[in-house]
């Protein structure tokens, strides 16, 4: 199986532009015979899209049944490529930072809700801005996957819980705004150590943005070692074989 990890630009609160980037990248990955293409945390709306006023944010977050989500599924079926992407999910009167995986037929086969609270501002209402409670696995092309979003794996208890579930590959969509120097000289090694604790193949993928600045980058970890990467400050796709 070939999986593409997308280091691509999002623009906050411009679903139209982000959706075009998603479609263009899906086409590029499909042309390169990838079986799936993956985007970082909250890519669809942009990581800083929310205003932390639920009366406003309920119109920014999207339900699983939203027409935009269905359109992405239709595009997956059209291009014969699976897609995973972070988005801000609306579930009745709750908002989550979630990651959805849609298979090649356009069917939603996994929707994971971030467990750790670092995605939201302290002013966020605990009534409306929520975290998920469970890790879950899903199967695609005879591989078993588990998802953890950004800060989830910085909690030892979450790593322990994740390791109780059998999986071949851990998907780690993130939003990181380190400088390249900070990432290369310190943080990347720390992330490698967290990946090693998971004891599995771990695919980390970050997004690019201009305001605020995020520099992208992707890593393919095996037992805590980086076996391939797309360095920060690159707009592109890292293809990995699993």
Image: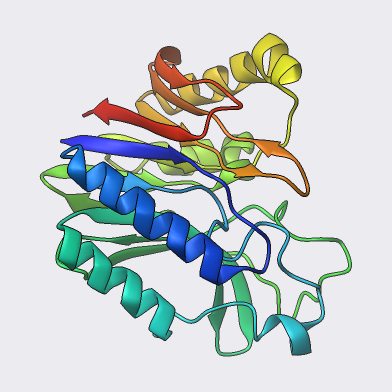
* Residue positioned 31% across, 52% down in the render: 26
Residue 221 at what x, y percent from top left?
41, 21
Q: Nearer the viewer, residue 72 or 120?
A: 72
Tell me which residue sits at (48%, 37%) in the image.
205
Q: In the figure, residue 125 lies in which quadrant?
A: bottom right
Quadrant of the frame with the N terminus: top left
Measured from the top left, where is residue 233 in percent x and y? 61, 27
User: Residue 117: x and y, percent?
Assistant: 70, 56
Of 29 and 93, nearer the camera is 29
Q: Horizontally, is 227 left or right of 154 in the view?
A: left
- Point out the image quarter for the C terminus: top left
**Colour setup of the view:** rainbow
Vertical placement of 175 versus 58: above or below? above
Tell me which residue sits at (39%, 37%) in the image: 5
Residue 185 lies left or right of residue 222; in this view the side is right
Identity of the residue drawn at 33% across and 79% down: 70
Question: Does residue 87 appear anywhere in the picture?
Answer: no
Q: Is residue 106 above or below residue 220?
A: below
Q: Is residue 101 visible?
A: yes
Question: What x and y, as percent, mark residue 101?
Answer: 33, 59
Which residue ends up furthest to the left in the rendered image?
Answer: 142
From this view, report whether residue 206 is shown above or below residue 126.
Answer: above
Residue 223 vs 178, above or below: the answer is above
**Quick one: 11 or 171, which is closer to the camera?**
11
């Amino acid at each position: 199986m070939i999986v593409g990890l997308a280091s691509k630009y999002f623009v906050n609160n411009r679903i139209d532009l982000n959706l075009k980037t998603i479609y263009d990248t899906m086409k590029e990955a499909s042309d390169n015979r990838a079986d799936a293409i993956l985007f970082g945390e909250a890519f669809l709306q942009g990581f800083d899209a929310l205003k932390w006023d639920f009366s406003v944010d309920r119109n920014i977050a999207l339900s699983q049944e939203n027409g935009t989500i269905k359109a992405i599924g239709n595009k997956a079926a059209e291009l014969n490529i699976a897609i995973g992407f972070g988005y801000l999910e609306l579930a009745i009167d709750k908002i989550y930072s979630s990651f959805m995986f849609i298979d090649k037929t356009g069917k939603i086969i996994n929707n994971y809700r971030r467990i750790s609270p670092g995605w939201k501002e302290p002013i966020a209402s605990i009534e409306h801005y929520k975290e998920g409670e469970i890790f879950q696995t899903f199967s695609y092309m005879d591989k078993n996957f588990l998802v953890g979003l950004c800060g989830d794996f910085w909690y030892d208890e979450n790593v322990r819980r994740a390791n109780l579930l059998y999986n071949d590959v851990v998907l780690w969509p993130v939003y990181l705004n380190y400088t390249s120097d900070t990432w290369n000289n310190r943080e990347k090694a720390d992330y490698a150590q967290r990946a090693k604790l998971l004891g599995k193949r771990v695919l980390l993928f970050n997004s690019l943005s201009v305001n605020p600045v995020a520099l992208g980058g992707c890593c393919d970890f095996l037992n805590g070692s980086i076996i391939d990467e797309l360095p920060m400050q690159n707009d592109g796709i890292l293809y990995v074989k699993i």
